[in-house]
Image: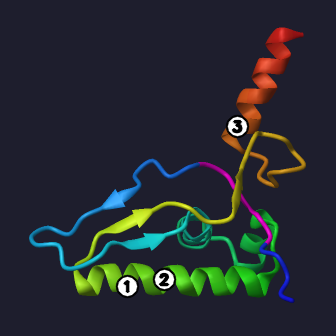
Amino acid sequence: MSRPTKYRRVCRFPEVIEFYPAGENTGEPIILTIDEFETVRLIDKEGLSQEECGGQLGVGRTTAQKIYETARKKMADALVLGRTLKIEGGYFDLCNGNPKFCCKQDCRKRQVQTEYNIERG
């Protein structure tokens, strides 16, 4: 029996969820999951190592590496084959600003939650 998939911790939902090729669309859209998107964001945009990314997602380094490889292949397929890329689904929990959930000190949700709690007293 295989091990159940562990939910990944995702900081925020993507602002843009569909990308279309200019010109004619060829074939079914390619689906990039939310956790795959978050992995690419953390490694390529935020500059985290695969180990740091795994820590943020709440998975091991090898799992983060596999997620990253799958995501990069899907993005390459969308670009090379001229297909729509949709971001949806996956196994994830969205950040709620709780310090136990998110390891980033500059987490926007954590800052908003802190400000809200200070104002409420």
The quarter of the rendered structure image containing the C terminus is top right
Q: Position of residue 110 (x, y in %)?
A: 76, 37
| First reached walking from the N terminus: tag 1 or tag 3 | 1
Within the magenta stretch, is there residue 91?
no
- Amino acid type, residue under disc 2 in the picture: Arg
- Amino acid type, residue under disc 3 in the picture: Lys
Give SS at disc 2: helix
| Distance (Cα) linking label 2 and label 3 | 28 Å
Q: On the image, numbered disc 1 is attached to which residue?
A: 76
Give SS at disc 1: helix
Q: Quadrant of residue 75?
A: bottom left
Q: On the image, numbered disc 2 is attached to which residue?
A: 72
Give the camera-side residue of 108 and 25. Answer: 25
Please, which residue is most extreme toward the top here? 120
Q: On the image, numbered disc 3 is attached to which residue?
A: 109
Q: Which residues are magenta?
A: 6-12
Within the magenta stretch, is there residue 7?
yes
Q: Position of residue 103 (x, y in %)?
A: 82, 55
Query: As drawn, is 15 to the left or to the right of 103?
Result: left
Q: Position of residue 42 (x, y in %)?
A: 62, 66
Q: Report crowding for label 2: few under 14, some 14 to 19, many 20 or more residues within 10 A (C-alpha).
A: some
For the residues labelled 1 and 2, say whether their Cβ atoms are less than 8 Å apart. Answer: yes
The quarter of the rendered structure image containing the N terminus is bottom right
**Residue 33 versus residue 9 in the image, above or below:** below
